[in-house]
Amino acid sequence: MERTIQETAELTGIAASTIRFYDRKGLLLRVRRNESGYRVFDDAAVNELRIVDFWRHTGMSIENIRRLAVLANNSELDMDDRQELLRVTRSEVEAEIQRLRHALELIDSFAERYESEQFSAADKEEFQDADIAWMRDMLSSKP
């Protein structure tokens, strides 16, 4: 059964704009175009879309998803290459988690600072200057 992009979006719960993005990035190798130039999705293309969307939600980069799609469509199934892509993605996700943890620490520190210091409207300029100095100090102590 062949589906339009809208039918595929409704079936999968993936926005049509996201599907178009994946296709433009070369991640959907099984999508074909009909005589009118519209994207057409058979069952294999829908499955491929779901797989691409899954990997995108793990934080895998577009380039690595593209490489994975090419490997999956190759007759030679190279598990070492696939495992390496997963290792790289895991490292990237761990780095992002570290960055987000640091961001949370900064936000929490800022909130604590606001709770511990009372500033009046007259102190606004002094308050902003102190904020900027504090932010600069916090960023310079970045791990």
Image: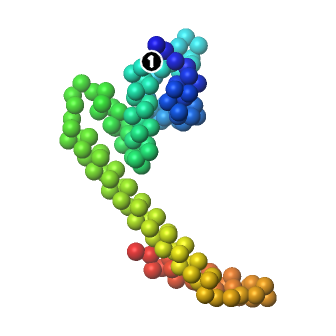
**In terms of depth relative to the viewer, which is nearer, 78 or 121?**
121
Left or right: where 42 falls relative to 90 = right
Res. 77 image quadrant = top left
The residue lying at 53 percent from left, 33 percent from top is 13
Label 1, on which residue? Answer: 42
When the figure is inspected, residue 133 is found, relative to residue 61, above or below; the finding is below
Where residue 95 appears, x then y in whole percent?
A: 38, 61
When the figure is inspected, residue 107 is found, relative to residue 31, above or below; the finding is below
Badge 1 density bin: few <14, some 14–19, many ≥20, Cα 10 Å: some
The residue lying at 46 percent from left, 64 percent from top is 100
Label 1: element kind: loop
Quadrant (top left/top right/bottom left/bottom right) for the C terminus? bottom left
Q: Residue furthest right?
A: 122
Which amino acid is tagged 1?
A: Asp
Left or right: where 119 falls relative to 40 = right
Where residue 59 appears, x then y in whole percent?
A: 42, 49
The residue lying at 37 percent from left, 55 percent from top is 92
Residue 20 appearing in the image: no
Left or right: where 90 falls relative to 56 = left
The residue lying at 21 percent from left, 28 percent from top is 76
When the figure is inspected, residue 41 is found, relative to residue 14, above or below; the finding is above
**In terms of depth relative to the viewer, which is nearer, 27 or 48?**
48
**In terms of depth relative to the viewer, which is nearer, 1 or 25?**
1
| Colour setting | rainbow
Residue 47 appearing in the image: yes
Q: How many marks?
A: 1
Where residue 25 appears, x then y in whole percent?
A: 47, 35
Res. 66 image quadrant = top left
Res. 15 image quadrant = top right
